[in-house]
Amino acid sequence: MKLDSEMTPELMIVRVHEKRIDAAGAIDFKDRMRDLTAGARGRVVLDLSCVTFIDSSGLGAVVAVRKALGPDRPLELAGLTPSVDKVFRLTRMDSVFTIHPDVPDLAGNFRDVV
């Protein structure tokens, strides 16, 4: 699973560079997220703007990451493509996660996804 991150003391942005988060990659996704977020503090924003497909295993992996981060380190989502957004709405996970239409810059300001 190709992920990278950028961070400031208050914000970490994790970008997913895969088209799919599905059963084949869910465990790898969780492991990579655990490695990237270990020791980081503050908000974590998951940039899903490259992801065009997520299945129930992928959704479960995102929820597991949220739980692993704990209540003091919220996991927020940004840049959802229409098909991924639909999965979050249909499963009502849009009421669990803070979802931003675009990805923040490192100053914490949100900008349009290109």
Image: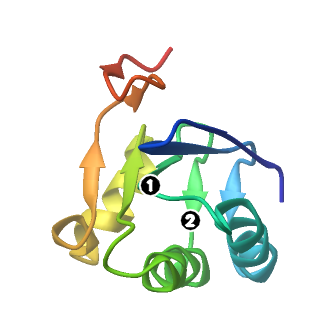
Q: Quadrant of residue 87?
A: bottom left
Apparent side of residue 104 relative to residue 14 in the rendered image (left or right):
left
* Image spot of residue 101 (x, y percent): 29, 34
Q: Which residue is mark 2?
A: 54
In terms of depth relative to the viewer, which is nearer, 20 or 105? Answer: 105
Disc number placed over residue 68 in the picture, else none: none
Q: Dots 2 and 1: beta carbons under 8 Å?
A: yes
* Image spot of residue 46 (x, y percent): 51, 51
- Report the residue at 68% width, 69% height from top: 38
- Report the residue at 65% width, 66% height from top: 39
Q: Cα distance, mark 2 to mark 1?
A: 6 Å
Q: Amino acid at mark 1?
A: Val
Position above or below: 99 against 97 = above
Q: Which residue is mark 1?
A: 84
Give the structural element (helix, strand or loop) at label 1. Answer: helix
- Report the residue at 37% width, 16% height from top: 112
* Image spot of residue 108 (x, y percent): 35, 29
